[in-house]
Image (spheres, helix red, strand yellow):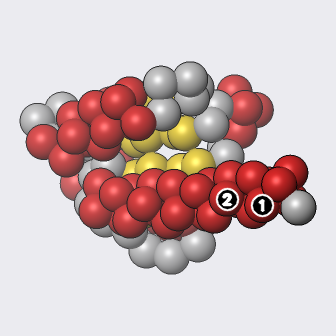
Amino acid sequence: MSETQEKAEFTVYTKSGCPYCVRAKDLLQSTRRSARVQEIDCDSFLSTPAEKEEFLATMATYCGRSYRTFPMIFHKGQFVGGYSDLVQYLERQNQVEEAFAEFQEEEVNA
């Protein structure tokens, strides 16, 4: 993973014609407006079956496991998963942020 990708808050690997790639980008734009999102179009890596297999093998090293569908989403360099995984991830993050805000409010009022 490049230094630019590691600096992005979210990195989304996409391919053309992928409705879940569009949904993931839209979700990040609507829920994380201030987040730096980098999109990487993978079409040029998927031209032939051999190139696709090489790309997926490389991505498996970044993901920590075999992952063969798009999008492939990373948050601060850590693999999140695909669109459904992103939804769950953001829901968990929101719950943690809400709990922390409640804790801070209780500390101030104590």
Which of these two is toward me, 83 or 29?
A: 29
Q: Considering the numbered disc 1 on the image, is that residue within a helix, a strand or a loop?
A: helix
Front tag of 2 and 1: 1
- Locate residue 17 relative to residue 93 in the image: left or right: left
Residue 63: image tag: none
Residue at the spot of label 1: 106
Q: Residue furthest front?
A: 110
Q: Residue at x 75, y 53 (%)?
A: 105
- Locate residue 108 relative to residue 54 in the image: left or right: right
Q: Residue furthest bottom?
A: 65
Q: Label 1 near label 2: C-beta < 8 Å?
A: yes
C-alpha span from label 2 to label 1? 6 Å
Q: Residue at x 13, y 42 (%)?
A: 19
Mark 1: amino acid:
Glu
Location of residue 93 (image quadrant) = bottom right
Tell me: residue 48, above or below residue 98.
above
Residue 39 visible here: yes
- Locate residue 29 relative to residue 43 in the image: left or right: right
Q: Considering the numbered disc 2 on the image, is that residue within a helix, a strand or a loop?
A: helix
Residue at the spot of label 2: 102
Instruction: Measuring from the top left, give residue 56's x and y in whole percent.
Output: 40, 59
Residue 56 visible here: no
Count of all numbered marks drawn on residues in the image: 2
The quarter of the image holding the C terminus is bottom right
- Structural crowding at the residue carrying mark 2, measured as other residues with C-alpha within 10 Å and reported as few (<14), some (14–19) or many (≥20): few
Instruction: Measuring from the top left, give residue 80's x and y in whole percent.
Output: 50, 61
Instruction: Measuring from the top left, give residue 13's x and y in whole percent.
Output: 40, 41
- Structural crowding at the residue carrying mark 1, measured as other residues with C-alpha within 10 Å and reported as few (<14), some (14–19) or many (≥20): few
Q: Residue at x 68, y 53 (%)?
A: 101
Mark 2: amino acid:
Glu
Which of these two is toward me, 56 or 110?
A: 110
